[in-house]
Image (cartoon, rainbow, N blue to C red):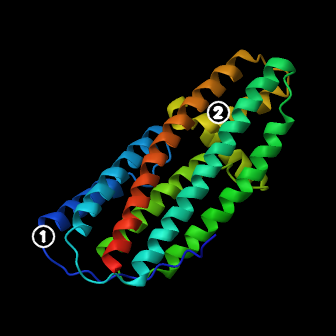
Amino acid sequence: MASFHVRSVSLPKSSHPLTLAVEEQLCQLRITEQATSSSSICKNLSGLKDLYECVEDFLSTQNGECLDSNLDGSILLLDVCSIVKDVLSQIKQSVQELQSSIRRSNEVSEYMIARKKITKVIRKCLSDLKNNKKNETEVSMLTEVEAAALAVFESILLFLSVPKENKSLISKLMLTKRVAHKSNEEISEIMKVDSAVKSLTKGIEVNNVRKTLGDLEMTLQDIEDGLETVFRCLIKNRVSLLNINQ
């Protein structure tokens, strides 16, 4: 995986309509880019698609040589997006296998093992993204676009991850209290599945688990569709940058 180091790109400052269009899309995306509810994530992926369409219009007006950092950034984004796509695919497969296991024997151990393996990948990627934020220097329009995209990818990883457990008894009691006051809308679909699976091991009725799994599968499909659209935008963006650099 590429190191998450981003060098700045110097673009001419102007009030060109295409530049303003990019900045407007950036402002809209920044409002909710770190939200981790499934509906917000899908909305942000749609906003990211619109942002890159504006970037494409902007790049079509550029004739100068592109700095290496632009191309490095495009590789970075494709790399991270590919990891998120792979994580989504693995979780979807685990959910489908869990559905099949429940129909046969209520066996959930394989799902729990898979979740732990996927969570390790997610935490490694989140750590790399955190280090990348520390390395950013000067800010320009394209680096802001890149940062916005990485923030959206980070929100997806956070949505898919298993929260770290705090071994402190006081912390556990406080967490339990907070969760108890959360409405169903505030608890992500994947957290509902994790909770339902743990309940299943205690002999709880499986019907609710099946419904929760079905809801999660639809959510993952919606996110996957949006992510695939963004991935195609990133490929197109890299091609445009390569053409400018020729």
Towards the viewer: 190 or 64: 64
- Say above or below: 90 vs 9: above
- Say above or below: 44 vs 109: below
Q: Position of residue 99 (x, y in %)?
A: 74, 25
Tell me the CA gap for discs 1 and 2. 47 Å
**Residue at coordinates 50% horizontally, 47% vertically from top-left?**
36
**Residue at coordinates 59% horizontally, 76% vertically from top-left?**
3
Q: Position of residue 239 (x, y in %)?
A: 39, 66
Towards the viewer: 146 or 245: 245
Q: Position of residue 89 (x, y in %)?
A: 64, 44
SS state under label 2: helix
Q: Quadrant of the C terminus?
A: bottom left
Which residue in the structure is indicated by mark 2?
192
> Residue pushed farthest front?
246
Task: Please name the amino acid that badge 2 sits on.
Answer: Lys
Of the two numbered discs 1 and 2 in the rendering, the one whose residue sits closer to the viewer: 1
Which residue in the structure is indicated by mark 1?
16
Task: Please name the amino acid that badge 1 sits on.
Answer: His
Q: Earlier in the sequence, mark 1 or mark 2?
A: 1
Q: Is residue 207 left or right of residue 64?
A: right
Q: Quadrant of the N terminus?
A: bottom right
**Residue at coordinates 64% horizontally, 20% vertically from top-left?**
211
Count residues near mark 2 (Cα–Cα under 10 Å), then give few for <14, some for 14-19, many for 20+: some
Count residues near mark 1 (Cα–Cα under 10 Å), then give few for <14, some for 14-19, many for 20+: few
SS state under label 1: loop
